[in-house]
Image (cartoon, rainbow, N blue to C red):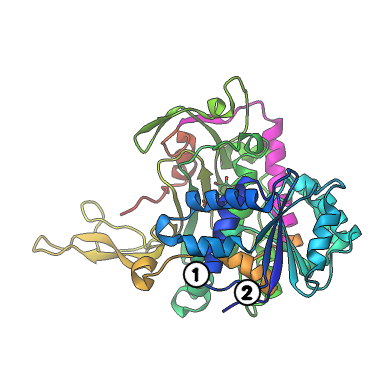
Amino acid sequence: IPVASFDGVVFGATGDLTMRKLLPALYYRFRDRQIPEASRIIAAARSRHSDEEFRGMAAEALRRHVPAADLSAETVEGFLAHVTYVAVDGAGENGWDDLTALLDERPDQIRSYYLATSPSLYGAICRNLSEHGLIGERSRVVLEKPIGHDLASARAINDQVGRVFPETQIFRIDHYLGKETVQNLLALRFANTIFERLWNADVIDHVQITVAETVGVEGRGGYYDTSGALRDMLQNHMLQLLCLIAMESPLSLDADAVRDEKLKVLRALKPIPAHEVPHCTVRGQYVAGAVDGKPVPGYLTDLGGEARSHTETFVALKLELMTPRWAGVPFYLRTGKRLPQKMSEIVVQFRSSPFSIFPAGSFGREPNRLVIRLQPQEGIRLEVMTKEPGPGGMRLRATGLDISFEETFNQRYPDAYERLLMDVVRGNATLFMRRDEVEAAWAWADGLLQTWAESPEPPRPYAAGTWGPTAAIALIERDGRTWHEDL
Ligand code: BG6
């Protein structure tokens, strides 16, 4: 279904995010005929380029980031005809008259301003948009994460943007919320009565959330070294996943109904006091090792050789929620770069029965687990105990009741940005973060960051291609539990 006609201005248009994610996402939406004829993608950045030059760069980006089977010369050409380039200094003065003239050609279009720049420029760009009269009722601004690097800087950015855009026109993007399987969490929890009744501390032993990546910092060292795994992945993507797992049922799917419930989860995060930080958290940094059988250098080499850095490329931690539903249930979260496989999953492990008619020992007895695979091989598996076939007596084995989304639906999974960019045009903010959510997440993360910053201990080294420092395994095994491994 086509959306309304729009002018999508992308600041930071020559950057990595635009090339790797935004242009491919818009290309797919064009290919699937969702982008109306009069819509324009207005690429804005400081360097000077003609439309033709920028279209050449965009075509190259599509060749690199879209599978060849999905590209046809005719469709690429049709898409690029919607793309215009304008040189604008977002935080300065140059180029704004050109951008204004361009937008004035089509005053009735929906306007979305996508800020794919450093967050330190968000305030200045918004001020410029306002001073040039470019904000109206049909305008929206999209802010990429990270919004600041702590609570104070996030508040400052939110204040600056909030001075010119009302909250309903601000779309803070967390692309994890646009992933199909993440949206599926809402369906799983609130469209199925069987799970919801079991979804509490009486029945659930603990929850694990793993977001593992094989990549290193990939030329983003400048940004990453000021950020680290907690700010880059955990404070946003992983806490959002936690919200969807832990929240109460929203009253509807309206943006504020969903966000009100997520906010309650974030506010219920139990602060980790400084003296418990060494016990409940593990920081790691990769050193040289091998991923997928190929040798790879360590983090410090990736940063450029001589560097010394205490930035964590891995974090594992245990947290708790102070709510009646979850009191006493630990949530174990871990994420890192240069781990053995790219894999994101949530494991809900149910309590074991206090009594069993099946003797322990040689008979396998495993707790039930619900494994939600976010990527790759998206799907849901309920691990249940079954009898091994054969005359050997009552031998039990954990087997999976599987739903593979790929096999069930047999269609391409759109990238998260495709859905989210169209939601911006539609004005649907359900899958975007509200100001108070972002700030509540920072308020919790700040305590941890501060304790780490004051600690003389560097992150623990782990070889690239392993599951992080051994202390991360000890973190969960100390509680008599283990990180989930595939059956
Ligand atoms: C981004 C982080 O938000 O998410 C990156 O800044 C990370 O460091 C990426 O690699 C992971 O996203 P995905 O969709 O590949 O899991």
Residue 58 point in image, percent of width and height: 58, 52
Check disc 2 and give the amino acid type: Pro
Along the polypeptide, which appears first: circle 1 or circle 2?
2
Q: Is residue 428 visible?
A: no
Q: Left or right? Give the position of 283 relative to 294.
A: right
Residue that carries the numbered disc 1 in the rendered image: 184
Q: Quadrant of the N terminus?
A: bottom right
Overall secondary structure of the magenta stretch? helix
Q: Quadrant of the C terminus?
A: bottom left
Quarter where residue 427 is shown: bottom right
Q: From which residue to which does the magenta span run?
A: 437-463
Q: Cβ(mark 1) to ligand 1 < 8 Å? A: no
Q: Nearer the viewer, residue 175 or 76?
A: 76
In the image, residue 323 sits, relative to residue 220, either above or below, namely below
Magenta span includes 138? no
Q: Cβ(mark 2) to ligand 1 < 8 Å? A: no
Magenta span includes 439? yes
Residue that carries the numbered disc 2 in the rendered image: 36
Q: Nearer the viewer, residue 299 or 473?
A: 299
Q: Is residue 269 visible?
A: yes
Identify the mark at residue 289; answer none if there is no mark: none
| Mark 2 closeness class: few <14, some 14–19, many ≥20 residues within 10 Å | some
Q: Residue at x 82, y 56 (%)?
A: 98
| SS class, disc 1 | helix
Q: Left or right? Give the position of 40 relative to 214.
A: right
Check disc 1 and give the amino acid type: Asn
Q: Residue at x 37, y 33 (%)?
A: 294
User: Given the current orientation, which residue lies at the most extreme top position?
Assistant: 306
Quarter where residue 426 is shown: bottom right
